[in-house]
Amino acid sequence: MKRLLTSIADKIERGERLNEDEALQLVCCDDLLALGTLAARANERRNGARVFFNRNRHINYSNVCINACAFCAFRRDDQQEGAFCLSPQEVGARAAAAAANGAREVHVVGGLHPEQPLSYYLALLQAIRRAAPAIHIKAFTAVEIDHLSRLSGLPISDLLAELRAAGLDSLPGGGAEIFAPAVRRRLCPEKISGRRWLEIMAAVHGAGLRSNATMLFGHLEDWLDRIDHLRQLRELQDQTGGFMALIPLPYQADNTRLPGLRGPGGVEILKTLAISRLFLDNFNHIKGYWVMLGVKLAQVALAFGVNDLDGTVIEERIGHAAGAVSPQALSCDDLLWLIRRAGKQPVERDSLYRTVREY
Ligand code: V47
């Protein structure tokens, strides 16, 4: 193992790419701290001591969804108790309030609604744009984009052009889950395939929009599936360069339909973050999403290759429906404190990772 770690350390210093075999060998490494040190070094070569955050607000416009993913505690059937669908005016009002509080970005996602036409989604974007003209609108996962394309009959490129004209600025990374078809069949059988998710992201990047990517882990998949997922993201990134960050999402188990699963423990989460950092040599940023990691583990993750803590978030529903124990929001002071106490330099960024302020 020592020899493997040394040869990987050499590769990192030379800026060479790890292959899948090497990534799988790292999985067998029981020396968590050595693995973390390697990932931290890979990150440091890229980002130094800088750790990014932004002032953002999540807005979930609806929890009504025609899919019924087994891991999702957020979705409801139309008419079911607790189902909601916000009007464009309500979404606009939330964006205006967020902007008044200093937010630079809204992150807007929801379920696949059975009734709402494309005009509803365009109205959402227009309402935000009117209410908060300067705010960056990061909206709609590849899964929603596929849904809108099917319901409107528009090819993806035309659809993206319409959404852009209405205010869309970039796309979040949700809905990727884990690409392996055998896992997806049990986890989210109605959802678009991993291949389709990648195809849509290729079109998004081809249209000149940037996006993120996610990996949902710690449920039915194994390490081979995780490395395969990362490999496919790396290959697309080689072609397009359009991904900004990977967000590894540890599975939250409450109120879901995967009986007997607890989600990954802290050691497995840190290992997954570190291996993601080491393997994805063409991603600039690995985001530690404190909502799902927990605030304190997200801070520790800054020593395991993570260089971005997402942002203030303000109102989160998807992870909390599944039992996430984190708060709803962090203040800028909280984020600054976490980053500084990890021995790092806080950098407030915009949605495209341009520096807003160095602290
Ligand atoms: O797509 C759903 C995941 C995602 C559970 O792009 C769950 O900047 C864990 O994508 N346990 C939404 N995860 C969150 C997301 C995201 C978050 C922060 C930043 C960005 C970004 C994207 O949450 C869903 C799904 O993959 N999810 N249920 C669960 N029980």
Image (tube, helix red, strand yellow):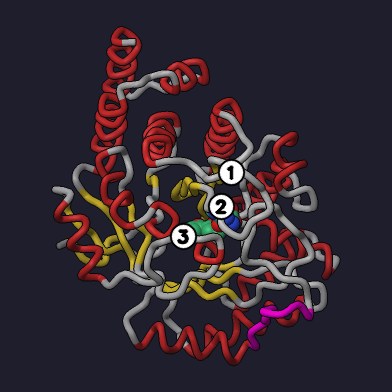
Residue 95 visible: yes
Residue 105 appears at what percent x and percent y? Answer: 43, 72
Q: Residues within 10 Å of mark 3 (few under 14, many from 20)?
A: many
Tell me if residue 123 comes above or below residue 321 in the rendering: below
Quarter holding the C terminus is bottom left
208 or 5, nearer to the observer: 5
**Quick check: marks 1 and 2 in contact, CB under 8 Å?**
yes
- Circle nearer the viewer, 3 or 1: 1
- Whether tag 3 and tag 2 are in contact, CB under 8 A, the answer is no
**Amino acid type at mark 1:** Leu
Q: Amino acid at mark 3?
A: Ala
Give the percent coordinates (x, y) of residue 325.
Answer: 41, 61
Numbered disc 2: secondary structure: loop
Q: Position of residue 2 (x, y in %)?
A: 29, 10
Q: Is residue 188 left or right of residue 164?
A: right
Which label number is shown at residue 324? 3
Disc 3: residue Cβ within 8 A of ligand 1's nearest atom:
yes
Is the residue indicated by label 2 positioned so its CB lies within 8 Å of ligand 1? yes
Mark 1, ligand 1, within 8 Å: the answer is no
Q: Which mark is residue 195?
A: none
Q: Is residue 288 left or right of residue 125?
A: left
Residue occupied by mark 2: 253
Seen at 36% across and 72% down, the residue is: 329
Q: Which mark is residue 261?
A: 1
